[in-house]
């Protein structure tokens, strides 16, 4: 909104030409998100305490976590608001990619909100049943796929796949049967990325500051990727699947950086508020959506390396127990394993942040190692 207002006046005031630049608007969106998050944080914490919207800790969690019971949860609402408002203020609202990302964020956050609400109502750590959670996430994924195919029909989206380390290898994700494109691989791959991203972030959100810090790192890497993908010169130089429409997603990712940074102020150890599923499921879905839009789905597995490892630890633990009757880890997700091994909570969080940063930096280097 601010972008459209100020840019309309750039002929009268040449200084307003600065709003044309993605870099300026990204910085503005990030600072706006940070400010909103920091200012609204105390108010939201007070309101959640007033309505007794507290976290319930599962009995099988590490013993030291029981003291966290009653800490205000559903703080992800603060992050979502702090992302959406700056995006609407500073992005070009005629860009369809912006709306796809915003709607995906809202829809996934709605699933998480229902999950959190049921936990509060039932006074248990069990919320929305897993099968319903996956069903709703799958329906959002299918809607996203249909949207992508609609954009493709207007040459606004490519169904080719960008493969890390390979310049020329960009396979199509549609399956041709009897001369007709069925897009079956695209559908399954989109569902895998977006549902996997959403649930992986959700599983990682178990320690004070862990998930927000890792989301901050991922969002920062995606900010770089969205910018170079939409920049004609950089995209050509790096042999990326160029898409000028993706450049406006840089503002969305910049807002995500500012919003999570502000939330981390209150979520750092010892946490004053938890993001809850409304935050973890929503932000995970948004990250997956951005990766799909900029054609960096495979690179997302490296950018969010810690999220992937955390999700795999749960899968391995469950399969091992069902098949062998034995557990591989002391407790899953992996961060609890290290807690029970004697690491303090802040040490686990900081070390996972460091590893997350290494994964993200490695991912960005692959753009040149092609």
Image (cartoon, rainbow, N blue to C red):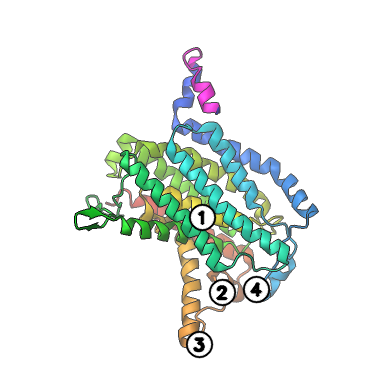
Q: For label 2, count other residues whose C-alpha is less than 10 Å away and answer few (under 14), some (14-19) or many (20+).
A: some
Q: Which of labels 2 and 3 is toward the front? A: 3
Kindly identify the residue that appears in the image at 46 percent across and 14 percent down: 11
Taking the view exactly as shown, the residue that stands out farthest to the right is: 50
- Element on which disc 1 rests: helix
Taking the view exactly as shown, the residue that stands out farthest to the top is: 12
Residue 123 horizontal side relative to residue 290, left or right:
right
Circle 1 residue: 284
Task: Tally the marks.
Answer: 4
Q: Earlier in the sequence, mark 2 or mark 1?
A: 1
Circle 4 residue: 61
Q: Which of labels 4 and 2 is toward the front? A: 4
Q: Earlier in the sequence, mark 3 or mark 1?
A: 1
- Element on which disc 3 rests: loop
Give yes or no for contact between labels 4 and 1 (Cβ–Cβ under 8 Å): no
| Residue 369 visible in the snapshot | yes
Kindly identify the residue that appears in the image at 57 percent across and 52 percent down: 109
Kindly identify the residue that appears in the image at 40 percent across and 45 percent down: 225
Circle 2 residue: 337
Quadrant hosting residue 256: top right
Residue 162, horizontal then vertical, whole percent: 30, 51
Q: For label 3, count other residues whose C-alpha is less than 10 Å away and answer few (under 14), some (14-19) or many (20+).
A: few
**Residue 37 in the image: above or below residue 9:** below
Q: Earlier in the sequence, mark 4 or mark 1?
A: 4
Q: Which residues are magenta?
A: 2-14
- Element on which disc 4 rests: loop
Circle 3 residue: 325
- Element on which disc 2 rests: helix
Q: CA distance from mark 4 to mark 3?
A: 20 Å
> Is residue 148 within the magenta segment?
no
Q: Earlier in the sequence, mark 4 or mark 3?
A: 4
């Amino acid at each position: 909104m601010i972008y459209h207002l100020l840019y309309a006046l750039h002929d009268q005031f040449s200084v307003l030409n600065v709003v044309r630049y993605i870099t300026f608007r990204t910085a503005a969106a990030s600072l706006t998100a940070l400010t909103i998050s920091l200012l609204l944080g105390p108010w939201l914490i007070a309101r959640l305490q007033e309505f007794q919207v507290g976290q319930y800790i599962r009995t099988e969690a590490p013993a030291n976590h029981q003291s966290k019971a009653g800490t205000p949860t559903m703080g992800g609402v603060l992050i979502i608001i702090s992302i959406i408002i700056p995006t609407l203020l500073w992005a070009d609202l005629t860009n369809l990619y912006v709306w796809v990302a915003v709607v995906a964020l809202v829809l996934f956050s709605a699933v998480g909100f229902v999950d959190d609400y049921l936990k509060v109502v039932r006074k248990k750590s069990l919320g929305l049943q897993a099968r319903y959670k996956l069903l709703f996430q799958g329906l959002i994924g299918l809607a996203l796929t249909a949207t992508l195919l609609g954009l493709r029909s207007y040459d606004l989206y490519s169904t080719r796949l960008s493969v890390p380390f390979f310049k020329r290898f960009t396979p199509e994700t549609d399956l041709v049967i009897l001369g007709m494109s069925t897009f079956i691989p695209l559908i399954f791959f989109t569902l895998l990325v977006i549902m996997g991203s959403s649930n992986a972030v959700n599983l990682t959100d178990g320690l004070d500051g862990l998930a927000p810090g890792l989301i901050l790192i991922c969002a920062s890497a995606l900010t770089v990727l969205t910018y170079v993908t939409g920049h004609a010169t950089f995209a050509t130089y790096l042999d990326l699947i160029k898409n000028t429409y993706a450049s406006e997603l840089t503002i969305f990712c910049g807002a995500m950086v500012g919003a999570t940074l502000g939330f981390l102020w209150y979520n750092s150890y010892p946490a004053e508020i938890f993001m809850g599923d409304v935050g973890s499921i929503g932000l995970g879905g948004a990250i997956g959506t951005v990766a799909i839009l900029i054609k960096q789905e495979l690179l997302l597995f490296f950018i969010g390396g810690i999220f992937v490892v955390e999700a795999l630890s749960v899968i391995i633990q469950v399969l091992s127990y069902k098949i062998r009757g034995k557990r591989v880890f002391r407790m899953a997700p992996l961060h609890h394993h290290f807690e029970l091994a004697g690491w303090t909570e802040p040490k686990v969080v900081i070390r996972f942040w460091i590893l997350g940063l290494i994964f993200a930096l490695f991912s960005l280097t692959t753009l040149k190692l092609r």
